[in-house]
Amino acid sequence: MLRALIFDVDGTLAETEDLHRQAFNRAFADLGLPWHWDPALYADLLTVMGGKERLAHYIDTQHPADAGALHARAPEIHARKTAAYGALVAENRLPLRPGIARLIAEARAGGLRLAVATTTSRPNVDHLLAINFPPGDAPFDVIAAGDEANRKKPAPDVFLLALAGLGIAASEAVAFEDSAAGINSARAAGLPVLATRSAYTNSHRLDGAFSAVSDLGEPGRPHRHIAGLEWPGGVVDLARLIRWHGALDGQGAALQALTSR
């Protein structure tokens, strides 16, 4: 039985990545650092999962001579970046991606539980949710954020944390991701994955997802099918997701075949 949906955040719930890039640049400018991350550089840096880890990697590879002093400043830089990101989300009224709010509403109405499994920091999740849901509304039963996990994606840690918080087995949930590392992370936790393309993961292979689409789609605004399971009308909806998942009950081989595409 399908009991929960587990969502990645950056690139999956919303197209957040370029605001993260801009927030890093604001932090650098505020702190007098002569650095600027353009989209091409940031796309390369996104191969490193987690903002703190991304910053550390940049320091080590681009400024090794000053690495000691710069690593000492890294907590200040990242804290400034997190504050700048929150301001940018509010300024831009950053919306959820197509189909996300609809599917969340369907899941809540259907009695399913909802969780987040992300490498980003918890304040970044809170900023995004505050913009897109009414005050006091908490759509997610569990939020497993990057600072709580021992290892970042593609390790399964953050998805395992989400499953533990929900108190369910991986066979009772479906994960939603947008990146190769995220798909590998969810699969390593035993979860089937539905993948969507995002602005910064256009070059990623989405192998391992049982279905890959441009977005979840809306009635009248269908998504583009990429690979795997196709959705009638170009819309991922809860009723069809439940039927797909129910067909897998007791069919571990079928699940393995579908999710290995």
Image: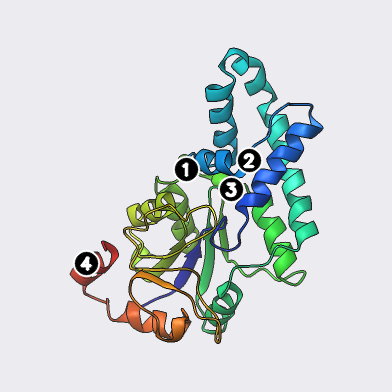
Mark 3 or mark 2, whichever is nearer to me:
2
| Callout 1 crowding tier (Cα within 10 Å): few <14, some 14–19, many ≥20 | many
Q: Does residue 141 appear anywhere in the picture? A: yes
User: Of marks 2 and 1, which one's residue comes earlier in the chain?
Assistant: 2
Q: Residue at x 26, y 61 (%)?
A: 260
User: Which label belongs to residue 257?
Assistant: 4
User: Which label belongs to residue 120?
Assistant: 3
Q: CA distance from mark 4 to mark 2?
A: 40 Å
The quadrant of the image that shows the N terminus is: bottom left
Percent position of residue 219, x then y:
55, 86
Amino acid type at circle 3 is Thr
Q: CA distance from mark 2 to mark 1?
A: 24 Å
Q: Quadrant of residue 212?
A: bottom left
Number of marks drawn = 4
Residue at which label 1 appears: 152
Q: CA distance from mark 1 to mark 4?
A: 26 Å
* Of 126 and 235, the residue lying toward us: 235
User: Which label belongs to residue 234?
Assistant: none
Percent position of residue 240, x then y:
40, 84
Q: Residue at x 56, y 38 (%)?
A: 41
User: Of marks 4 and 2, which one's residue comes earlier in the chain?
Assistant: 2
Are the residues tagged 2 and 1 within 8 Å (C-beta)? no
Identify the element where label 2 is drawn: loop
Mark 1 or mark 4, whichever is nearer to me:
4
